[in-house]
Image (cartoon, rainbow, N blue to C red):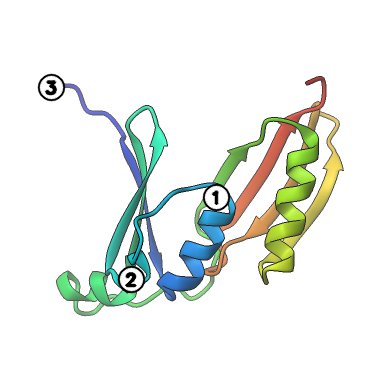
Amino acid sequence: MTLRLDAIGLVVADMTASLAFYRGLGLEFPDGAERAPHVEAELGGGFRLMLDTEETVRSFQPGWQPPASAGRIGLAVRCPDPATVDATYAALVAAGAHGETKPFDAPWGQRYASIHDPDGNGVDLYAALDG
């Protein structure tokens, strides 16, 4: 068997807030996931995003503590067009997310913005400017 990266796992302080944020990016989680200690969403191509509560991690690593500062991982979300970058950024900020970098036309040819999830992880939104 060949090794293959197939999931990204995030430890979350507030499952409800994290689910709301990632649902705002279009990910689908099962109904009732807010009460689960571990949830997953399919990302396509067999890849998954996994969310675990801090309590879940402590169940097998009793001494685990969250990092002293947030933002130790960065995710990137490709949007179908520049207008979706703007609309998604605006909707997530309106829902309470921290907007790090407002949408702008980047010199590398993308509409680009950065936002933080509820645990401070950076999530970039981007789309090609040329359509």
| Residue 24, above or below 64 | above
Residue displayed at 74% across by 60% down: 100
Residue at the image position 37 percent from the left and 27 percent from the top = 45
Q: Nearer the viewer, mark 2 or mark 1?
A: 2
Q: Dot 2 surroundings within 10 Å: few (below 14), some, or many (20 or more)?
A: some
Q: Specify which label sits upstream in the sequence, 2 or 1.
A: 2
Neighbor class of circle 3 (other Cα within 10 Å; few <14, some 14-19, many 20+) is few
Q: Quadrant of residue 2?
A: top left
Q: Looking at numbered disc 2 in the image, what kind of residue is underneath it?
A: Thr
Whole-angstrom CA distance, mark 3 to mark 2, is: 31 Å
* Closer-to-camera residue (57/19): 19
Write the residue at 33% across / 67% down: 32
Q: Is label 3 in a helix, a strand or a loop?
A: loop
**Which of marks 2 and 3 precedes in the sequence?**
3
Depth check: give the residue in front, 116 or 41: 41
Q: Earlier in the sequence, mark 3 or mark 1?
A: 3
Residue found at x 76% / y 49%: 87
Q: Residues within 10 Å of mark 1 (few under 14, many from 20)?
A: few
Q: In the picture shown, does residue 76 fall above or below 89?
A: above
Q: Nearer the viewer, mark 3 or mark 2?
A: 2
Name the image quarter holding the N terminus. top left
User: Which residue is under mark 3?
Assistant: 1
Read off the residue under disc 1.
Answer: 74
Marks 3 and 1, how far apart in space? 29 Å
Name the image quarter holding residue 128: top right
For label 1, the SS is strand
Q: Name the foreground residue: 81 vs 60.
A: 81
Badge 2 element? strand
- How far across and how far down the image is residue 125, in percent? 67, 44
**CA distance separating discs 2 and 1:** 19 Å
Q: Which residue is mark 2?
A: 53
